[in-house]
Image: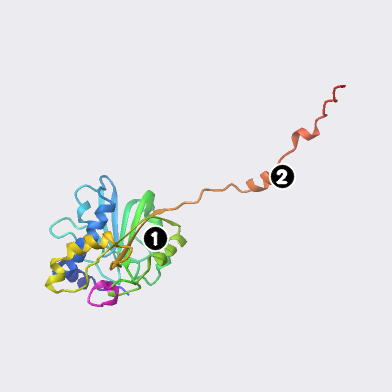
Amino acid sequence: MHLDVLDLRNFYYRTQLGRVAQRAIRDQVTALWPDAKGQTVAGYGFAVPLLRPYLDNARRVIGLMPGPQGVMPWPAGGDNVSVLCEETAWPLDTGIVDRLVLLHGLEASENPSALLDECWRVLGPGGRALFIVPNRSGLWSRSDKTPFGFGRPYSMSQLDAQLRKQNFAAERQQSALFVPPSSRRFWLRTAAMWERFGLRVSSVVAGGVLMLEVSKHIHAPQRPGLAATVRRPLRVLDALPKPAAEPA
């Protein structure tokens, strides 16, 4: 179930809690991908708040927003890079994307396998994708006051298994949003401290979102008949006369 783009915009850009969430997740994205100079960076779902650091040096930035969610122009005050698209048919050439971010995309999809096939298609050789989903063990997925309380939450093992099934290879994993999903002033003012603390003890404290970086896994091609040829090698030398044994 996709949320409306206006609700997502209002949360991330017009509430203090949304700006805290945006900053916490974006900091982890830029820690994983500090530079995208000369690369094509795309985001699907409502990932545009995470793409701003790449506007200046990336070759191209594209914000893909699914039809059931709706689209809004982005970035404000600049040339629009967002586009409305079908969930499983993106207006991108095969293999064109170097970095792909999904936020509020996978957990809201009605056909996640087909969506992942499309992610795999547009990702180029050596490209990386970053899937950001609500953590089923975290506090944020239990509250419908934020966008992370909608859709299907995941555990890291569930997310990893689903992506491996679609021929993605896991590379790195991370968590974010360790601050409680509260608009009270104390939690908002101490959010940065909670994020630093949570990253140090993430094996004990559950973050609100899970982040899994993957690469595109391509199987090595196999020539038909090769295995049979190996199992039944040609015995060319067997037909030649063997030399007589020398006398002792």
Query: Residue 132: where, in percent of width, then height?
Result: 31, 63
The reply, left or right, for residue 195 in relation to residue 122 is left
Q: Which of marks 1 and 2 is nearer the N terminus?
A: 1
Q: Eyeballing the image, is 182 above or below 61?
A: below
Question: Nearest the camera: 145 or 198?
Answer: 198
Q: Which residue is the site of mark 2?
A: 232
Q: Quick one: SS at disc 2?
A: loop
Query: Is residue 193 in the magenta section?
Result: no
From where the camera sits, is residue 179 visible?
A: yes
Question: Nearest the camera: 190 or 65?
Answer: 190
Q: Callout 2: 10 Å neighbours few (<14), some, many (20+)?
A: few
Q: Callout 1: 10 Å neighbours few (<14), some, many (20+)?
A: some
Alpha carbons under labels 1 and 2: distance apart: 41 Å
Quarter of the image for residue 148 reads bottom left
Q: Which residue is the site of mark 1?
A: 118
The N terminus is located in which quarter?
A: bottom left
Q: Eyeballing the image, is 26 above or below 247?
A: below
Badge 2 amino acid: Arg
Residue interval drawn in magenta: 139-148
The C terminus is located in which quarter?
A: top right
Query: Residue 155: where, in percent of width, then height?
Result: 38, 68
Disc ID at residue 25: none
